[in-house]
Amino acid sequence: MNYFPVPANEQERLKALRRHDILDTLSEPEFNRITELAAMICDVPISLVTLVDEKRQWFKSVLGLDVHETHREISFCTHVIMETELLEVPNTMQDHRFSDNSLVTGPPAIRFYAGYPVIDQEGFALGTLCVADLKERHLTDEQKRALQLLAGQVMELITERRQKQELMSFQKMFNLANDLVFMGGDDGVFKRVNQAFTRLLGWSEDYLLNTATFEFVHPDDIAVTVSQLERLAMGEPKVSFLQRFKTVTGEYKCIEWTCIPQSASGIVFGTGRDVTEKLKLERTLARTRDMLERTNTVARVGGWELDLRKQKLYWTPVTKDIHAMPADYEPTLASTLEFYKPGESRELITAAINNAVSMGTPWDLELQIINARSKEVWVHVIGNAVFEDGVCRRLYGTLQDIDDHKRVEIALMQAVNTQKELNKELKEKAALVQEQDKTIQDIKEYKFLADSIPEIIWTSNPDGTMEYYNRYWFDYTGMTLEETAKFGWAFILHPDDIEKDYLDWTHCLNTGTPYQSEVRFKRKTDGTYRWHLARALPMKNDKGEVIKWFGSCTDIDEYKRALILENKISQFEDFNRIIAHNLRGPAASIEMLLNMINDEEIAEEKDALFNMLKTSSFTLNDTLDELMKVLEVRNNKNMAYDQCFLPEMVAITDAMLKGQIVATKAQITTSLQVPVMMFPKMYLESIFYNMVSNSLKYSKPGVPPEIHISSKTEDGRIVLEFSDNGLGIDLGRHGQNMFKLNSVFHKGYDSKGVGLFMTKTQIETFGGKITVESEPNVGTKFTIVF
């Protein structure tokens, strides 16, 4: 059975039980005599004193059973403590509460039970005194009364046992206490003293108990002692006083007594603590404090303390005197800050206080205050923070008047600095005289060198105003010195270059970075504009400040024209490759369709092939038209961006490669999240053509190609992906040569090694990037980020 009843006050009952400190203690004769007497009176073989714990019943005394506790679930006594009266069960087999109890159905096969609750003075049923028999029976009224009386005796034994334990504990504490503990009578004699008296004073316990108390008291303290005892006699509940008490060596110890009377018995209980050393320390501290205050007064060092919890600020008298404030002045944090001189001093002290409160940072500063007499005073301020539980609770420190010392120090520093400046100026004057002759010669040599160089040489001031031009400037531009000073470069710069060059030059003046710009200057002799590379470097002093700009303008017109010509040749070569590559696919597709028409005998199939041939020829014509348009654009030196529809790109590619797609039974699928993009259409068609034609060309024999084209946006850029299930590429062998010209990775195919090179070039020309992922016999994926 798992259920057992629980009193409504169970938690309080358990606390009361444990206060008696009796559970799991040894057997005691007093309790054993009660169980033996109960068994004899009730004429039963089993008798127990039980205490009902939280999950068990424990036997303080047991007669007739060889156990010391049982689970509470099978406890008879747990039912007894629910009431305050006797519980008698004549036949356990006939009582539904116990008929299936293991103590009834099994050994010891209890048939009769009677128990009386053991109740303490607070009314808590702690356990029972109970008897049991192995046969059915009834108690007489006399036996019931006897059981009740014995249960009360059990409670008295428990109480007496607890009181004995408490008395023993008190006696132990009484003897081991470091403080003096005593009991005294109204006859002026100690009744009991603890061992601390002998340890501290040296007197034996016997001598102390047989000698009048006043024999030990210092004569000067007798009157005070009598007065305190009279206060107790008049009904005061407690008195405390100091008294000098003589030791066995004749010396006196200063004892701080606390006494409490017991009016009914006339007994006085008291404790005493030796405060001899404490009083000596306090007197020493007082003398030290007095000396420190005198020293601080002479040295003009004051103290201060700020209680942040109470927002209370305390100043010592010297601190008030430094501020020229009266002795009764009560400062605040706000008023204190107002004394500090506005500006650096007030800002520094405010920041120091904030840092101390937030981070515990101490400070040590020399600042200026303006005292109540409007006098500026230099002070040395030191501050520290005290934290409790991570929060600043108190600030404290010192404030010293250092005005005389500081003013002497400042005057001395000013004199020293003045002398240093004077010495420095004298040296500079002497050095300047020596350098002037050398500088004049250097300037002549610099101008001669600059005039002999066949390009423009110039210098300017830090603000960009021109300071010097060599002879070549005037020869090339035909401008006079006055015209140059008035118009600068604007008079000869190509109109298209003026704004950009102005922005470049202004940026360099503001940042101090080197200047470089390609501009066109008008030549005086023929009025033509020629390209020049204008450059300038800043000369800086030790502080990194620009003090002068040195520049040159080099004629690069022939070089620029050569670059333009080289770029144009490169574009035509690239265009020729595109024509050759892009026409080869449609031509091959037309050739394949013609072969298929020749081999086909069914008229309907031939018609379908003729339609495909017609589409491929149209696509070829369109490709040629687009190439011609690109050629015109290239001749105009600009490559325009077109609005390209990606589904249209897929359709054009499908038409161009229709023969290969039909022959290989290829499937092209798309996932175009981005359907439209801006890119040169001719280049994008070439990219689509190269990607799809490669997938068709390098498909696995006997396996229809599966080609997937997708577009999306990542990080604001358009991403295009081409993936297939073809032969794949061994990137371990060919990864480094993937996009190089004339690189071929599969033998036995009509490959030129141009398509991937051209695709990469087209993409990177417009700021994009192409990457590849591939695995042999699995497939390949090209990713293009535009």
Image: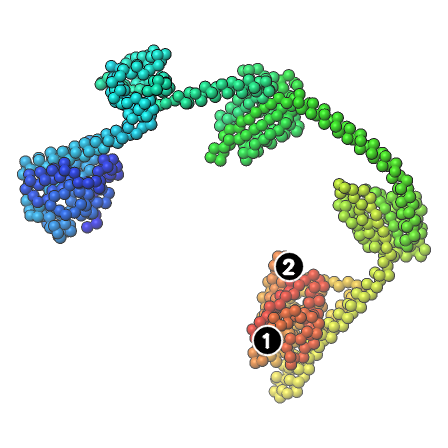
Q: Nearer the viewer, residue 188 or 354?
A: 188
Q: Nearer the viewer, residue 499 or 272?
A: 272
The amino acid at mark 2 is: Arg
* Classed neighbour count for the residue bearing mark 1: other residues with Cα under 10 Å, few (<14), some (14–19), many (≥20): many
Say if residue 707 shows up in the picture. no
Looking at the rendered structure, the secondary structure element under dot 2 is strand
Q: Which mark is residue 481?
A: none
Q: Nearer the viewer, residue 35 or 77?
A: 35
User: In the displayed structure, would residue 538 be above or below residue 662?
Assistant: above
Residue 480 location in percent, x, y?
94, 46
* Classed neighbour count for the residue bearing mark 2: other residues with Cα under 10 Å, few (<14), some (14–19), many (≥20): few
Image quadrant where residue 13 sits: top left
User: Which residue of the protein is positioned furthest toward the front in this rendering?
Assistant: 249
Mark-to-mark CA distance, 1 and 2: 30 Å
The residue lying at 11 percent from left, 39 percent from top is 35
- Look at mark 2 in the image and give the residue it sits on: 717
User: In the displayed structure, would residue 493 be above or below residue 602?
Assistant: above
The amino acid at mark 1 is: Leu
- First in sequence: mark 1 or mark 2? 2
Left or right: residue 1 compared with residue 385 = left
Left or right: residue 689 compared with residue 80 = right
Image quadrant where residue 264 sits: top left
The residue lying at 59 percent from left, 70 percent from top is 774
The residue lying at 10 percent from left, 37 percent from top is 147
Residue 404 location in percent, x, y?
66, 21
Q: Nearer the viewer, residue 87 or 614?
A: 87
Say if residue 435 shows up in the picture. yes
The total number of labels drawn is 2
The residue lying at 69 percent from left, 65 percent from top is 763
Looking at the rendered structure, the secondary structure element under dot 1 is loop
- Look at mark 1 in the image and give the residue it sits on: 727
Q: Quadrant of the C terminus?
A: bottom right
